Image: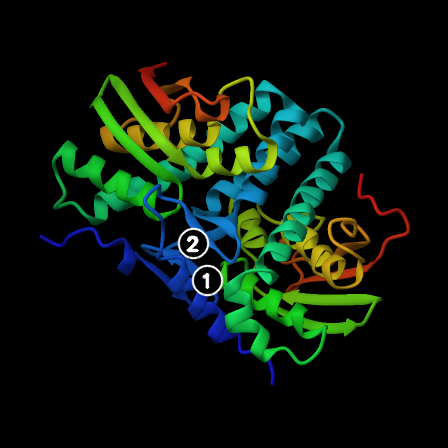
Amino acid sequence: MAIDGNKIIHAVMEGSRIREAKGIIPLFGVYLSILSTIYYNRINFEFEKRMCDLGQEEKARALLVAAAQECGYATFQGIRNSWEWDEIVVPMLESREDQIHGFTAVAVAFGWGDLHVVELVPEEKLVIRVNDSYEARGYIREYGYSTAGKCYMLRGVTGAFMDLIYGGEYPDGCFSFLAEERRCRAKEDGYCEFIARKSPHKSIL
Amino acid sequence: MKPFNWQEELDRDGHRLVFSGQTFAMHCHHYNINLQKMLEEALGEAGVALLYDAAEKASFHNFEYLFARYDQIKTLKSKLEMVAIMYQNCGLGILHFRQIGPDGGILSSPASHHVTGWLAKHGRRETAGCHFSRGWIGGVMSALFGKPTGYYDVRESSCKMKRDRECVFEIGVR
């Protein structure tokens, strides 16, 4: 059975309407917030700009990717251990690799973009393509075109997907894979593309 | 009068998540708290200011639009109710407005996403840490009273991240 992304989107939309008395949304084993993408884009790109003023542009990019990869690693571990995952996604899984398609569908449901898996070589390589990432769109709107990729969150998350499936036992597998963004709409490519490969260093910084 | 119905406002436009036509995204406490820690560690006070500024600009943009869209919601009390509903339904927590006016005011929060997330990941802090909420409230105040962002200064006099009983925000004019 193939992963039915619409079923996952429906479950996330329904679940996101349920919150406890304290105004917290506990869903898929994590606490969710629903926030304007203006907030995330401003943090990412202004942080990069200020670090650039300090001569630390590369460090800024690495920190942004690392923040997302650590988050993706913990978040999707929580997600795949949740009762919602057991109930909705597990019946659709036929192979270990199918989990990545399940993760991708959850990311689409979260509003991160229209992610789809272009290539998956078990243990080696994952290629995810996104035509409409909120990071690239937000960057272009605020700053115009760039000469480098700007989707730091999606870069980290692509690495995290591979870490969770092929990186070994949780919680020791984070940064086993690292992703590059070869193409990005923010640098006038037609789409954003993320390629995760095994990392020899197990570190991004 | 058309009531503010957040369930109708939160919708999808294809793969996009939209709230009242504006692009939103869901993220969990791991990401939100990682970003805060990264900013505090890499830039110190400038990082805190950046987090405040990002939250302020985002909430100002959202509420400037929402107050115009729901222009039948006229009284301050009704608008504050709408703000509290939005905060709660975006999973951000609970806000209790105490005294609010064009010159500032005071409000408290017995629970929030960032407090729950910070305590779950890092435990108790020594300093107040609800920079996101301070900025978000600052943006709301500017939208409520027709002021530019940066007009208000929101300080946190007690914080649950320090294990105080509740978070208390005091708003003044800069």
B88 displayed left or right of B17: left
Query: Given the image, what chain letter belongs to the residue carrying mark 1?
Result: B
Using residue B40 as the reference point, say whether residue A174 is left or right of it.
Answer: right
Instruction: Give the vertical position of B148 relative to A48 (above or below).
Output: above
Label 2 element class = strand
Labels 2 and 1 touching (C-beta < 8 A): yes
* Quadrant position of the C terminus of chain A in the picture: top right
**Residue that label 1 marks:** B16
Asked if residue A52 is positioned above or below residue B82 in the image, the reply reads above
Q: Callout 2: residue from which chain?
A: B
Q: Residue at left 64%, top 32%?
A: B38
Image vertical order of residue A31 relative to residue A127, above or below: above
Quadrant including the N terminus of chain A: bottom right
Nearer-the-camera pick, A26 or B87: A26
Residue matched to label 2: B23
The spot of residue B95 in percent (x, y) is 30, 33
